[in-house]
C-alpha cells in the first residue's frame, strides 16, 4: 500500500506532510508506517519506514530531524543537523534541507511556517505541552530567528477528538484553576467525567500569540484505526504498545 501524506492548504509552498499509518512495512499492532523508535516494534522496520518517508519526500533519510519528546515546553533551535540526541518537544530552524519531524499517536503534531522570512517549526503538543506553553514557545523561538508574527501560518494535524478524549475531574480542575474561561473547552460526560477539546484549546493558545492564520486537520486518531495510530485506543483494546505517526516540514534550497 502506498504512503498517505495529508497536506495543509495553510502550508502550501512549503514541503510538509502529516503522514498516516498507511503504507510501511510494520506488522501486527504496528501494521503500516510506524515511525516510532520508542515503540517495541522491530527497529529495522521502523528504520525502513522512515526511509520510505524520506523517499516519498524525495530527500535523504539523514535529513529527517527528530528530538526525544518528553511532553515539555522546551523548543530546540537548530542551524545544522544535530550531532547528538536532543530532548524537547519542538524544533525551529531557518536553515534549508532540514525536515523537522514530530511523532504522535493522539497528541497533536503542529507545523508552522513563515514563508516570507523562511522560518519553520514543528511541535509535539499533548495536553501537558499545550498547557505549559509549547505552542507559544515555538512561535517565540521562530520570531527570534527572523519570523514575523503576521507571516506565520500554522496547522494542527490529526489528533484525538473531544468525543473520544474523556478525562476526570482532577484534569478539569488543573486546566481551569484560576482560568474559568477554559471551562468552554470541556463538555460534561458520564458521572464526574468530562470530554476535553484539545484542538480548540490549542487553537486558542496559538491565536493568543497574534498568529491568526491557523487551521487544523479534522481527522480523529482514536476513531480512525485504519488511518491512524492511537495511544488511548491501544489502552482501551488492551494492546501492550502502539505505533507512532510522523509529521514533518522542510525549507527547500
Image (cartoon, rainbow, N blue to C red):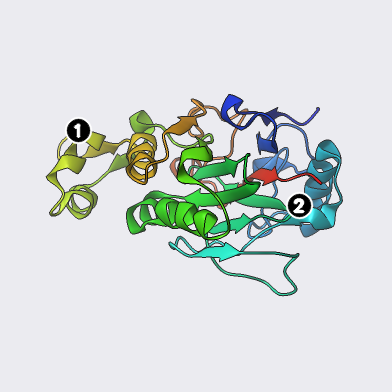
Which one is in front in this view, the residue at disc 1 or the one at disc 2? 2
Dividing the picture into quadrants, the one containing residue 37 is: bottom right
Q: Where is residue 66 in the image (x, y as percent from the top left)?
A: 67, 59
Q: In this view, does 17 lie to the left or right of 104?
A: right
Q: Distance between the residues labelled 1 and 2?
A: 50 Å
Q: Work out which residue is located at the far bottom of the displayed protein and give it.
A: 84
Q: Position of residue 20 (x, y in %)?
A: 65, 34
**Residue at the image position 80 percent from the left and 51 percent from the top:** 45
Residue tagged by mark 2? 96
Dividing the picture into quadrants, the one containing residue 116 is: top right
Q: Where is residue 235 in the image (x, y as percent from the top left)?
A: 46, 46
- 10 Å crowding of disc 2: few (<14), some (14-19), many (20+): some
Is residue 232 or residue 200 the one in the foreground?
A: 200
**Residue at the image position 58 percent from the left and 49 percent from the top:** 122
- 10 Å crowding of disc 1: few (<14), some (14-19), many (20+): few
Is residue 12 visible in the rendered image? The answer is yes
Q: Is residue 46 left or right of residue 58?
A: left
- For label 2, the SS is loop
Residue tagged by mark 1? 190
Is residue 25 visible in the rendered image? The answer is no
- For label 1, the SS is loop
For marks 1 and 2, the one nearer the N-term is 2
Position of residue 183 relative to residue 175, above or below, is above
**Residue at the image position 83 percent from the left and 42 percent from the top:** 52
The quarter of the rendered structure image containing the N terminus is: top right
Amino acid at each position: 500500500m502506498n504512503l498517505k501524506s495529508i497536506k495543509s492548504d495553510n502550508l502550501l509552498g512549503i514541503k510538509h506532510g502529516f503522514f498516516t499509518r498507511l503504507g510501511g512495512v510494520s506488522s501486527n499492532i504496528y501494521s503500516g508506517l510506524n515511525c516510532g523508535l520508542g515503540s517495541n516494534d522491530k527497529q529495522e522496520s521502523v528504520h525502513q519506514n522512515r526511509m520510505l518517508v524520506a523517499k516519498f519526500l524525495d530527500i535523504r533519510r539523514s535529513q529527517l530531524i527528530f528530538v526525544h519528546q518528553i511532553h515539555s515546553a522546551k523548543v530546540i533551535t537548530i542551524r545544522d543537523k544535530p550531532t547528538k540526541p536532543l530532548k524537547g518537544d519542538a524544533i525551529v530552524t531557518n536553515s534549508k534541507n532540514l525536515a523537522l519531524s514530530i511523532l504522535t499517536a493522539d497528541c497533536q503534531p503542529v507545523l508552522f511556517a513563515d514563508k516570507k522570512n523562511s522560518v519553520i517549526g514543528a511541535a509535539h503538543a499533548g495536553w501537558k505541552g499545550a498547557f505549559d506553553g509549547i505552542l507559544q514557545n515555538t512561535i517565540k523561538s521562530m520570531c527570534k530567528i527572523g519570523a514575523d508574527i503576521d507571516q506565520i501560518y500554522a496547522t494542527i494535524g490529526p489528533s484525538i477528538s473531544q468525543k473520544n478524549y474523556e478525562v476526570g475531574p482532577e484534569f478539569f480542575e488543573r486546566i481551569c484553576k484560576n482560568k474559568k474561561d477554559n471551562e468552554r473547552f470541556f463538555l460534561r460526560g458520564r458521572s464526574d467525567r468530562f470530554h476535553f477539546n484539545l484542538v480548540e484549546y490549542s487553537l486558542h493558545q496559538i491565536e493568543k500569540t497574534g498568529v491568526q492564520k491557523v487551521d487544523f486537520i479534522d481527522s480523529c486518531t482514536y476513531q480512525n484505526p485504519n488511518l491512524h495510530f492511537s495511544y488511548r485506543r491501544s489502552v482501551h483494546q488492551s494492546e501492550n504498545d502502539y505505533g507512532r505517526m510522523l509529521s514533518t516540514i522542510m525549507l527547500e534550497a
